[in-house]
Amino acid sequence: MKKAIIGKKLGMTQIFDEVGNVIPVTIIEAGPCVVAQKKTVEKDGYNALQLGFAEVKAKHLTKPEIGHFEKAGVPMKKHLKEFRLDDCSANVGDFITVDTFAAGDKVDVTGTTKGRGYTGAIKRWNLHLLGKTHGI
């Protein structure tokens, strides 16, 4: 069964195994996500859940987004993402948390990189400038 949740990367840290080897670990704030819309085969042609993540004030949303959340009767969220699922047992207004996943489950993660445009070497590879007066 396919499961879905939206998260945000908080940072990196490290943990140590029994032998003492260092393992890099990514810390992710995953959920809670609210079900904003449920799509079914009968009405929409496929099964899907639309999840919302990260609370936001109404002034930061467009009028169509505000209307979408008010129609569903759910709190306003910053991010909306639709996931096609085989089994859509959740209903509109339900919260999906990390508890839906078990230890050892395979997880497929998709991310977005911060765009930095056409950067130079200093920003791209963290190089350093020489001193302004280095005798040349």
Image (spheres, rainbow, N blue to C red):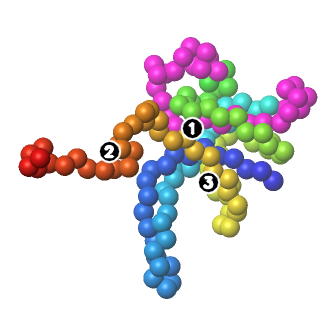
Residue found at the far bottom of this picture: 19
Q: Residues within 10 Å of mark 1 (few under 14, many from 20)?
A: many
Mark closest to the chain's N terminus, 2 or 3: 3
- x then y, percent, for residue 90: 75, 42
Relative vertical location of residue 24 with respect to residue 69 in this rendering, above or below: below
Instruction: Give how far apart the Cα atoms at labels 2 and 3 are.
Output: 39 Å
> Residue 122: which numbered mark, if any?
2
Q: Is residue 65 magenta?
A: yes
Instruction: Compare marks 1 and 2 and give the one earlier in the sequence.
Output: 1
Find residue 107 and report its image quarter. Answer: bottom right
Task: Label 2: state its secondary structure.
Answer: helix
Kindly tell me whether residue 53 is visible in this rendering: yes
Kind of residue at disc 3: Val
Q: Position of residue 17 (x, y in %)?
A: 50, 79
Disc 1: which residue = 53
Q: Can you give x and y, in whole percent of width and height, for residue 11 in the image?
A: 43, 53
Return the x and y of residue 88 as percentages of the image width and height.
80, 42
Evaluate whether residue 93 shows in this view: no
Q: Earlier in the sequence, mark 1 or mark 3?
A: 1
Q: Give the CA separation, mark 1 to mark 3.
A: 13 Å
**Which range of residues does the magenta coloring cover?**
40-68
Specify the farthest residue to the right.
42
In the image, what residue occupies the spot 68% across and 53% down? Answer: 108
Q: Secondary structure at mark 1?
A: strand
* Residue drawn at 50 percent across, 58 percent down: 26
Residue 39 sits above or below residue 2 on the image: above
Query: Which disc, if any, is residue 98?
Result: 3
